[in-house]
Every structure is written in structure tokens, then in C-alpha cells.
Image (tube, coloured by chain):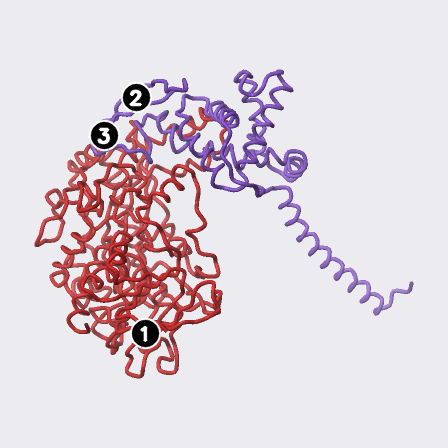
Amino acid sequence: MSESTVAIVGTGIIGTTFAYLLSKKGYDVVIFEKGPEYPYPHVSQHKEKIRYLYDNPAYRLPKDLKNLTYSGIYSRADREREMVVGGMAIRWEAITLRMTPNDFRTRSLYGYGENWPLTYSDLEPYYCTAEELMGVSGKDSDNPFAPERSKPYPLPSFELGYYDKIFAEMLREHGIVLHTTPQARTRVPYGDRSACVNIGTCFVCPIGARYSPNYHLQKAVQSGLCKVLTNVTVKRIITDKSLEAKTLVYQHNDSRVEKEHHAKVFIVANGAIESARLLLLSADERNPNGIGNESGNVGKNLTFHHMWGGNLKYKEPVYPGRFGGLTGQSHQFLDPPDRGKHGGIKVEFSSNVLAYRRKGSIEQRKGSEIVEYMRLMPHWRRIHLTAESIPDPKKYVKLSDKKDRFGDLFAHVHYESSDFDYESYRFCTDIFKKFAFATKATEAKLGEVDDFDSASHHMGACCMGNDKRKSVVDQFSKIHDSSNLFVAGSGNFPGTSGAINPTLTAVAMAIRIVDYILDQLL
Amino acid sequence: MRVTRRNLIKILAVTIGGAAIGFTILKWQKKVIKRWLMPNLKDGPTDTLEDGILQILLTATETIADVPIDTLHYENLFRWRSENLRGYNNLYNKFARALNSSAKRLTGKDFIGADRETQLRILDKTYQIRMSTGKLNLVRYGIFERDWILFDRYIIRDILRLFIRTDAWIMLGYESWPGKVRGLRRYRVAPGKIKLKSNSLGRQRRSYYV
């Protein structure tokens, strides 16, 4: 049996934020990760993937450890997850946006979803700290829709690309604002992190310019106060009758022996779906439906962003992909007049080149034919329209009937679009047409309504609220009625984070929770 | 035999049972046959790539590319795979021997000494395999051209994939490709032009504005 002051489940961006900040305050932390180590800086991974076209199996877990079952229309959630040290943020786009004040009060303002149990003002100082922690480059001077801030961005922004500037001018003539994109990517050197040099393969940045949580986890370990256990599966958490968490039961992935770990504070931060799964698997005599599930809300309120991809073709080449990150976005539609009938929409020009032609490229005889096949690639630009979504009875996580190698049930995801989502799609279609017209696209194709991508934004499933009949955790992500068990991350969101990328909000909340833990428990 | 009800039931039972067993065997065999006809890379030691083998690989690369390329990243790919992934060193050696053997049969010269048209004609076999459809072709190549299936899957496709991510971008008008340091100035201005110059091996190399 082992012991620490703090035990954390999951080494993603939320778990590592807790580990770093708590160890920095002098508390010993043990953090459990189901997957393997993922070296940082990501130099070897960059070489393997980019130079040597090698998808290293060492960073993949087998299907009897990492798996989901599905029903409904969305079956990509497991592919979107990463179970390695660093979690999904080892390959994220690093777009770090703040929710707007209205996003926290959709029930009061628009009659849908639930109000958050905290306001933008409560979280604002922590947004600043989160931006400093990750090194966010940005500016609001070109974005009239940005929420108020008490401190400037820590780093200057990445300017619009050449073609984004041209698009911005064209869109302005039609009353649409295209502005720069705040992102956790170093525009200039930041502490011991070097500046971005636009290598462009940001999903595996070899120099740490694009923020990886492994950066702070490494510092936590170097402090001597943080221990990372990899290749271990946390199977359940045991509480006493007052719902105080006592023990965490885990098992090395290649061992038959269960082990126990005691701690004063337990933090579950292994993603919306897996966190819900762990609570459900922790069912026992005291918690017959799972921990925190007296109300039956664990697993409910699962929401994804609905991101539709649109392809725009231009007469002249526009050369997508010259910058690895994103530059041009529009927050003009985050809070539209008809919000309530449908959700807010975020629009961004992607840096991705169209991949749809590459599949056919390999079927050419020689390089010159491949070039001919790809000839129109520089003329196409991809645009993403991300819609907020809301909880629905047809969106949930439950336990599957399929078991992992330890005999524990996997999670099952059921997800269907609701009328709100279909209305959001109609609104997206209108916006897409405006963008196509304003930028003089010669062709414009938007994905089908059920062909959306969640953008790996998995939210809800352990949602927060003041009313424990409708939620799992309180505003500090503490399980209702528990004194020391926290379930943190975007799984707490009562719905999506508006149409805004959730990570900055989740990190800001984690920092706020650290303050609470230090104040109340340690 | 008189066809009584009992005999009829016996006949039906044997027929159905036999069909079920036959179907199972066929299904199992299909998997085995398919696995046998679509070979995977065989295990083998990792090792340093010999210069002579590398030159043949790079010549094949230039032939398939059919446009000016920077061969350094292909060289890095071949060397790394040979030194780090089991089976590749053997495969590269086998490929080089096969290319030389084909070239000698056609022209009396080795692969590097043969003209470009002959080189492409030899490499075309992988293209035919890649584009083949139908069970008859699967069986034909699986029995008679197993090595060339491997050459296509583990060498030629790698070359094409790398080309698509690198030199193809230059041919399409980009100054550089993702994976190289491109700086934060170029993407903010209109795309520039590129100059070609030769490296010490006499192969064309590009210089890039930063």
C-alpha cells in the first residue's frame, strides 16, 4: 500500500496542472496514468512521425485497455482520446479562448441548458493565470467580441497570414470581422521555452513552442515531490460512509495484482468519458450506483462540440498550410440574436491542406502524376464552423457490456443530434454561404449535418451545479457531499463551453480548484 | 433406396451439416489464403544500410518522383528504417538485387546504369500490383510476385507518401513544407520564388528563404 497527500488520476493537461501547482506548494503528489510515458520535448516522436513516417506502437494501448462501445451517430470518441502521459494535449491545436460572460448563463438568458455555478467574473483572474501558465500569444485589439480582461496576454499575437489578411479585408466589406487567434504557442521566447519557428507539424511540436502539459509535469517531477506511475489502470475509488475518499485501487497493466493507494485528496482528471466510467465502476455497498451518482447524473449531460468542415475553392491559389497554427478566426457569431433557437458558432480558417485528395495520390504511377493530381490543393481552403451543443437525454455515457482485460466494463457512448443541433447546422450553413460569397469562392462545400467532428472536445458527463439533484460536482469540482474527492476537467461543464474551445476554461477552473484545496483541505 | 421420411431427414441433416462444415473451412481458408497472398514484412536484423544499396534506392526514388527532388529526406528515411525497424535492411537488399537483376535481363546493365525509361518500366510492376483488382490478380501476384508485393507495400508507398508531404509541395508552388523550419515572416507575405542548386553529391538541392 502506498500513500501521498494528493492522488491524481490522469496526466492530461488538467491532471498535470494540479500536479505542478500542488507540488510547487510543497505537497507530495502521485499521478496515475493508464498509458505509457511520452518523452518531452517531443523530438523523437517528431522524427518518427514526420521524417520516418513511423507510427510508433509504443504510444498506443491495446484494445483490451483502451476502448469504447457506441450507439447513435458518433463513433470516433475513442480515436480522439490519447492515453499517454500528457493526454490529448500532446497533439492539440493549442487554441486558448475564453468563454464569454453570457456563455455561463444560457438558462437565464436564452432558456436552454443550465447556468454554470460560477460566473465569468469568478473565473477571470484564473483565465489570466492559465494564460501565463501555458504562454498564450494573443491580442484583443482586433477582436471587438472578446470579453473583458484584467491583464494583457503574456505574449504578442501571431499575425494573420498573407491570405487571411486578404480574406479579412473582403469579409470586412460584408460586415464580418476576421481577427487573430489566441493560442498557447510561443510567439517569442518564454521562460525556458523557445519561440515558435513555424515548423508546421504542431500536433507533434519538437521544440515545445506549442504548449504540452508534459512541460509542467516534468518540472513537477524534477521538484522531487511528484511521482508519475505509468502503465497503470485505476480501477475504482473507495469511500467511507461519509463519502470521504480513502483509497484508490489500481493495477499495473501487465500485473494480476491489485494495489491500493491512500491520499488525503483525490482528483480524477482523466477526461469526461473515462472519469464518468471510473465513478460508475466504483459502485459498492455505500455507493450502489457509483460514486457521486445518487442523482443518476453521472454519465448524463455528455456533449461534444459539433464542428463542421467546409471546403472553399478559389480561382487563384491561397496556399493553406504555410503556418502550422491557426491565424484567422471570427467570434462574431458566438452570441447571435437567435441564440436559444440554436447555438453560437465559432468560425476559423484551418491551416490544414485538404486531405481528401491524398488518398488518391498514392494511386498514381509517379511523382509528376501525383503533382498533377494534387494540382488544385493550393486553391482550396478549409474552414471550420464549431457550434455549441447542449445536453440531451440522447447524449450520455454508461457502462458497456464489453470488458477490459481486468474484467471491468468499458464505457459506452450514446450520442445523437438534437433539434437544437439541427438548427445550429442551419445557422452554420447561412454563415458558411456568407463567407463563401464574401471571399469570392468559386466552389463551396459544407459537410453534412451528422458528419460533424467533436474536435476532441468531450464535455459534461460529470457536470457541475449547485443543485445536487441535477449535477455530480459543485463549482469546485468536488463530488457533492464528499470532502476530498474531485472530478475535474471539461467533464464538469454543464453543456459545452459555448462554441469556444474548452481547454483554457478547464485549466482556469483547475487553478481555481487548487486555491480551494489549499485553502480548505491542506 | 426407398425415400422414407426418416431417410429424407437423414439426407437433409447430412447435407446441412456438411454445408456448415464446408462453409467454416472455406471461411477459415479464405483468411489463411488471404494472409498467405498478402505477405507481411518478414522479421530480420536491423543494420546499417550499405552505400551501394542506398544509391540504388535513391535512384529508384528519383525515377519514381520524375521531378527534381531533394534526396536527403529519402536517404534519412531509408537509413533510419534499416537501422531501427526489423526486416527493412533485408528487404532493401532484396529490392536492390531484384532491380539489378531485372535491369541486367533487359539491358545488360545494372539498375543505376540503365536508362530512365527502363528503370521506370521495372518499377512499374509495383504500380500494377498497387492498382490490381480481382481475386485472380490477388492469387497471381501472391504466388508469383510475393517479393514485389512487399516492395510496393514497404518501399514504394513510403517513397510516394514522403514525396506527397515534401517535394510535391515545392512543385505546387510552396516555398517549403511542414516539418522544416519556415520562420514567422514568410507566411505573412506573398509566396516567393525558389532557387535550385546542386549539393556535394551532384544532386539538386533547394535553398529556402527563411
Which secondary structure lies at badge 2?
loop
Q: Position of residue B109 (x, y in %)?
A: 59, 16
Q: Is the C-beta separation of discs 2 and 3 under 8 Å? A: no
Which secondary structure lies at badge 3?
helix
Using the rendered view, name the quadrant where residue A13 is placed. bottom left
Using the rendered view, name the quadrant where residue B194 is placed. top left
Q: Amino acid at mark 3?
A: Arg
Between the C-alphas of marks 1 and 2, the distance is: 62 Å
Q: Position of residue A229 (x, y in %)?
A: 36, 62
Between the C-alphas of marks 2 and 3, the distance is: 13 Å
Q: Which residue is mark 3?
A: B186
> Are dots 1 and 3 on a single chain?
no
Q: Residues within 10 Å of mark 1 (few under 14, many from 20)?
A: many
Q: Which chain is red?
A: A
Q: Earlier in the sequence, mark 2 or mark 3?
A: 3
Q: Amino acid at mark 1?
A: His
Residue projecting furthest to the left = A150
Q: Position of residue A148 (x, y in %)?
A: 9, 53
Q: Which residue is mark 2?
A: B194
Q: Which residue lies at the image location 66% right of the left edge and 53% below the top edge?
A: B28
Q: Which residue is mark 1?
A: A262
> Are dots 2 and 3 on a single chain?
yes
- In the image, residue B92 above or below residue A153: above
Q: Which mark is residue A283?
A: none
Q: Amino acid at mark 2?
A: Ile
Using the rendered view, name the quadrant where residue A8 is placed. bottom left
Q: Which residue lies at the image location 41% right of the left edge and 60% below the top edge?
A: A231
Q: Which chain is purple?
A: B
Q: Chain of mark 1?
A: A
